[in-house]
Amino acid sequence: MTLYARSALPLMALIAVPAPPALAYRPFDSTDAAVAARGEVEVELGPVGYQRFPQQHVLIAPALIVNCGIADFWEVVLEGKQFFVVDADVTGPRYRLDEAAASVKTILRPGSLQDRSGPSVASEVGVLLPSINGESGAGASALLIVSQRWPALTVHANGSILWTRAHEPGFFAGLIAEGPDAWTVRPVGEVVLEGERGARTVASVLAGGIWRVTQELAVDAAVRLAREAGHVTEIRLGLTWAFAVGLPR
């Protein structure tokens, strides 16, 4: 879901040949039942984002996810975000590295996202890494993803159980809807529910679009609204770039 602890530049230096069409799973919190092909890398980069809380304004620069195809139907995922509070009066650190995670994702059932019939099904298990100037504990997650593509609509359903960084049980549920995959620019939306024991459940909605610039590059923009410590508005801008690294296929 569905990117933190990674630097893309060394990987980009290894480009060898073009990759197949990129599926942008920016700008969502959820993810899709697809993985990077073996020997390929997908970089999901949000160079700058913005969050407005009732009493605080935050820049996200950057949000980063790197998906590395390590075998057929398997990938390793590294992700994280940097947050900078931009208000004049701040109590506590202005900088936070958060939402860092490392996970392994695999296709359980190849389906419509793999040019076969029926739903695509995938699972992802990972470690939630400690934050810098945030929660210092580690956690874990287990996610199931079901995706179905039709000519006019693609949907991705996510369900996850969590052991949070605060060492409490939690959950995540998300649903993505996308317009026709054949369109160069397609509208997208997402609804999410997430929470943990002892904390208020957070509900959010997202609306935006994805522009497929080339077969290897897609650009996205979206606005997210959430009920979290008051009303939260977030603007997300980013891109997804897929390329091969010359590994054995």
Image (cartoon, rainbow, N blue to C red):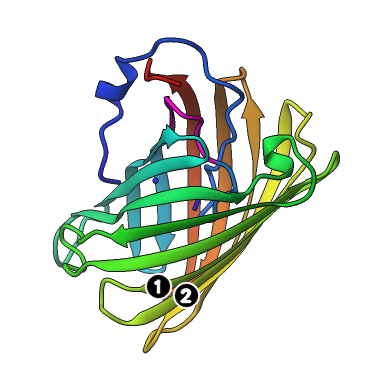
Extreme residue in the bottom direction: 198
Residue under pointer 1: 162
Q: Could you say where residue 32 lies in the image, as x and y percent from the top left?
A: 59, 48
Closest to the observer, 51 or 208: 208
Q: CA distance from mark 2 to mark 1?
A: 5 Å
The part of the chain drawn in magenta is 35-43
With respect to residue 46, does 89 lie above or below?
below
Residue under pointer 2: 171
* Amino acid, disc 1: Leu
Query: Is residue 230 visible to the viewer in this orientation of the structure?
Result: no
Is the residue under label 1 in contact with that under label 2 (CB below 8 Å)?
yes
- Element at label 2: strand
With respect to residue 245, does 146 lie above or below?
below
Instruction: Please give the name of the residue rendered at 20% of the width and 61% of the height, measured from the top-left corner.
Output: 130
Q: Is residue 232 magenta?
A: no
**Relative to 13, 124 lies left or right:** right
- Density class for disc 2 (Cα within 10 Å; few <14, some 14-19, many ≥20) is some
* Amino acid, disc 2: Phe
Q: Could you say where residue 160 lies in the image, as x and y percent from the top left?
A: 50, 68
